Image (cartoon, grey):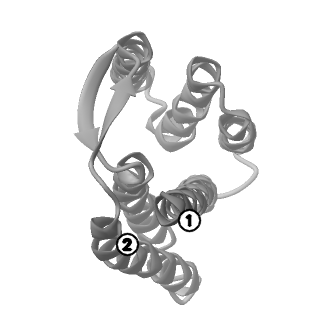
Amino acid sequence: MDKKLKTAVDEPLGGLILMTLLTMIWTIVGENSLKGKDFYALGIIFMLVILYFISFYLNFKKRKLLLPMTPIQEDTKKEKLYWIILIIEGVAILVMQNILVNINKDALFIPCFALIVGLHFFPLAKVFNRKFDYYIGTWTTSFAVLGIFLTIKHSIHPYFINAMVCFVCATSTTFYGLNMISNAKKIYADEIKTNATC
């Protein structure tokens, strides 16, 4: 176990930064696919979510100064497994992209990308013992499979399928971010209560 000095809310706040970035990326790609056919309504909704995440992060950065820096034990085994999962995910995306290019199925890239992203939540759920990851993984994977099926069947225009998958993924990162905000609030409240009784 490694020990590092940090506040108890550092982990959820760090995760919130990543969720903010990912929500932004999925939103931009989704709106680019729709090309304004939704009058940018979905883009506006998710941009409001992103602004909320940024606002919460900046405000909470000030509040966390009230918390003491304490030695936090980090499980190096879990951290290594986390990075292994991410590396496998990255390699799988690159392999998938090359396969799709070689078989002239570029239209499947976004749904297949989302499928890999969705699947990576399941081992993460096991490693960190988080049920929430199972829910997000199931949600993302289900719509990714639907996107692949609809693309293969040519039943709906690819731009709509890609947009649907992107905004489903943006919803996933939104819920993940909201979960991290909830965790940060709980940790902060517990820390303040503990310090007040000391």
The residue drawn where x is 63% and y is 26% is 125
Q: Secondary structure at mark 1?
A: helix
The residue drawn where x is 57% and y is 58% is 190
Q: What label sits on residue 52 in the rendered view?
A: none
Q: Position of residue 117 (x, y in %)?
A: 52, 34
**In what quadrant of the picture does the N terminus appear?**
top left
Q: Secondary structure at mark 2?
A: helix
Q: Would you call the spot at circle 1 few (<14 residues within 10 Å), some (14-19), or many (20 or more)?
A: few
The residue drawn where x is 51% and y is 75% is 46
- 17 to the left or right of 129: left
Q: Count the numbered circles shown.
A: 2
Would you identify the image quadrant in which residue 63 lies? bottom left
Q: Position of residue 140 (x, y in %)?
A: 66, 43
Q: Position of residue 2 (x, y in %)?
A: 28, 18
Residue beneath label 1, please?
A: 189
Residue toward you, 142 or 50: 50
Question: What separation in Å lies between label 2 and label 1 (alpha carbons)?
Answer: 12 Å
Above or below for 99 versus 159: above
User: Closer to us: mark 2 or mark 1?
Assistant: 1
Q: Position of residue 71 (x, y in %)?
A: 30, 34
Q: Is residue 112 visible?
A: yes
The residue positioned farthest toward the front in the image shown: 198
Callout 1 amino acid: Ala
- 171 to the left or right of 105: right
Above or below for 70 versus 29: above
Residue toward you, 95 or 3: 3
Residue beneath label 2, please?
A: 60
- N-terminal of the two: label 2 or label 1? 2
Callout 2 amino acid: Phe
The residue drawn where x is 57% and y is 79% is 42
Q: Would you call the spot at circle 2 few (<14 residues within 10 Å), some (14-19), or many (20 or more)?
A: some
Q: Is residue 147 visible?
A: no
